Image: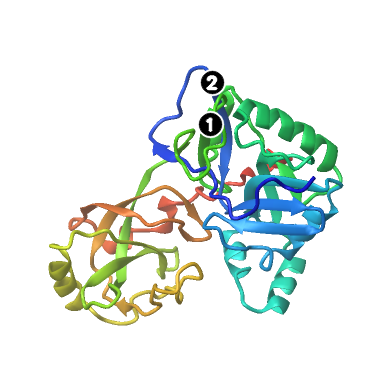
């Protein structure tokens, strides 16, 4: 029997909440810091799908091969692609995989093989859909599937799950390294493809004082699109660590005038902003350096690989704070080593 549904399939999504939900009917899972991936297999046909519905197998041939080695003729799995480097996961190595040259991808895969961490089973070996089954039933079936097919394949791992709040809190305390937060899922819910009705995510929101070391113009306009954030190391070098945007349209002309008046190279004296994002061809790699005089306090949820993983939000302008006080020790210890959860 062939699979009863084919890719692309919109993955189930989560809405953000501030606290871990409590009470009956919740299953808790780590929220891994990687690439979301749905894996389809129908005998010799293997397809890896990104969260946006794009094919991923060309970038992760090692994972496709590992899935092909499983002694299961057909299945659909939902999980996260990660790349271990040392005792932690490297998001930079994930991004490097998105390369147009197959030879380069193969070289990267040989140096740092990826892992597929599986947290849901959407179709079993009979090819029948489990989308309408409850999470508790899908998890039971997944654990049986993993117990039978995963033991001899180190690149395919079962993600831990628990209905115990204490366990969830312990995972949440590790957030900041390989973990991006905690997921809480309704155990009685079906797989809500493309919806945010059955799952919530909880992240730790922290703050840091950063120096503005540069800015980017908005696409197609001479007004500020984003401000580039920096932190000083012990040697006094200013490293680019992320960006902040989301300014009100009425504020952009004033901000543009303010920072254009501060334009002065080099801006960042350590790690500088890179080129265009591999995920978006619209984002320009061009940026304008400014004198490091302005300090802002921002909120962030995750710091890894020497930068904020997501955009930040300005809380306030710190006119009273000296730029040299904005150091990397504010985020020290945020890159924990929670890879041990899989061992």
- Residue that sits furthest to the top in the current view: 24
Q: x and y percent of residue 142 in the render? A: 72, 35
Residue sitting nearer the eye, 200 or 20? 200
Tag 2 near tag 1, CB within 8 Å: no
Residue sitting nearer the eye, 22 or 337? 22
Residue at (77, 68) in percent of width and height: 110
Would you call the spot at circle 2 few (<14 residues within 10 Å), some (14-19), or many (20 or more)? some
- Disc sitting over residue 185 in the figure: 1
- Residue 4 in view in this figure: yes
On the picture, is 225 further left or further right than 328? left
**Secondary structure of the residue carrying numbered label 1:** strand
- Residue that sits furthest to the bottom in the current view: 265
- Residue 83 in view in this figure: no
Would you call the spot at circle 1 few (<14 residues within 10 Å), some (14-19), or many (20 or more)? many
Residue at (58, 38) in percent of width and height: 30
Q: Which residue is mark 2?
A: 25
Q: x and y percent of residue 240 in the render? A: 41, 67
**Secondary structure of the residue carrying numbered label 2:** loop
Residue at (70, 41) in percent of width and height: 123
On the picture, is 20 further left or further right than 207? right
Classify the position of the N terminus by image quarter.
top right
Reply above or below: 127 against 167.
Answer: below
Residue at (17, 66) in percent of width and height: 252
Classify the position of the C terminus by image quarter.
top right
Q: x and y percent of residue 300 in the render? A: 38, 50
Q: x and y percent of residue 148 in the render? A: 84, 37
On the picture, is 334 further left or further right than 216? right
Q: Return the disc, 2 or 1, that comes first in the chain's sequence.
A: 2
On the picture, is 297 further left or further right than 182? left
Reply above or below: 143 against 217.
Answer: above
Rounded to the nearest angstrom, the CA distance separating label 2 from label 1 is 8 Å
């Amino acid at each position: 029997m062939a699979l009863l549904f084919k890719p692309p399939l919109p993955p189930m999504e989560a809405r953000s909440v501030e606290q871990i939900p409590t009470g009956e009917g919740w299953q808790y899972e780590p929220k891994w810091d990687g690439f979301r991936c749905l894996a389809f297999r129908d005998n010799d046909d293997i397809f890896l799908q990104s969260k946006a519905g794009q094919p991923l197998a060309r970038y992760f041939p090692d994972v496709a091969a590992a899935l092909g080695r499983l002694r299961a003729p057909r299945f659909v799995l939902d999980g996260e692609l990660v790349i271990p480097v040392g005792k932690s996961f490297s998001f930079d190595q994930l991004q490097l995989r998105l390369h147009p040259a197959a030879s380069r991808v193969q070289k990267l895969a040989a140096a740092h093989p990826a892992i597929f961490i599986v947290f849901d089973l959407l179709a079993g070996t009979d090819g029948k859909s489990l989308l309408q089954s409850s999470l508790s039933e899908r998890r039971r079936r997944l654990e049986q599937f993993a117990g039978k097919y995963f033991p001899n394949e180190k690149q395919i791992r079962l993600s831990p799950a628990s209905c115990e709040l204490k366990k969830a809190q312990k995972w949440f305390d590790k957030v900041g390294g390989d973990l991006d937060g905690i997921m809480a899922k309704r155990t009685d819910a079906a797989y809500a493809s493309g919806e945010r009705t059955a799952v919530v995510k909880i992240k730790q929101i922290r703050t840091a004082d950063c120096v503005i070391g540069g800015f980017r113009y908005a696409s197609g306009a001479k007004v500020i699109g984003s401000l580039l954030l920096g932190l000083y190391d012990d040697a006094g070098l200013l490293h680019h660590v992320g960006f902040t945007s989301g300014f009100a349209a009425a504020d952009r002309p004033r901000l543009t005038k303010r920072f254009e008046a501060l334009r002065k190279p080099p801006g960042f004296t350590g790690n500088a902003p890179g080129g265009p994002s591999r995920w978006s061809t619209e984002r320009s790699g061009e940026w304008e350096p400014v004198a490091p005089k302005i300090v802002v306090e921002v909120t962030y949820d995750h710091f890894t690989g020497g930068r904020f993983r997501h955009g930040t939000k300005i809380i306030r302008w710190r006119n009273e704070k000296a730029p040299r006080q904005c150091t990397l020790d504010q985020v020290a210890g945020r890159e924990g080593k929670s890879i041990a959860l899989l061992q």
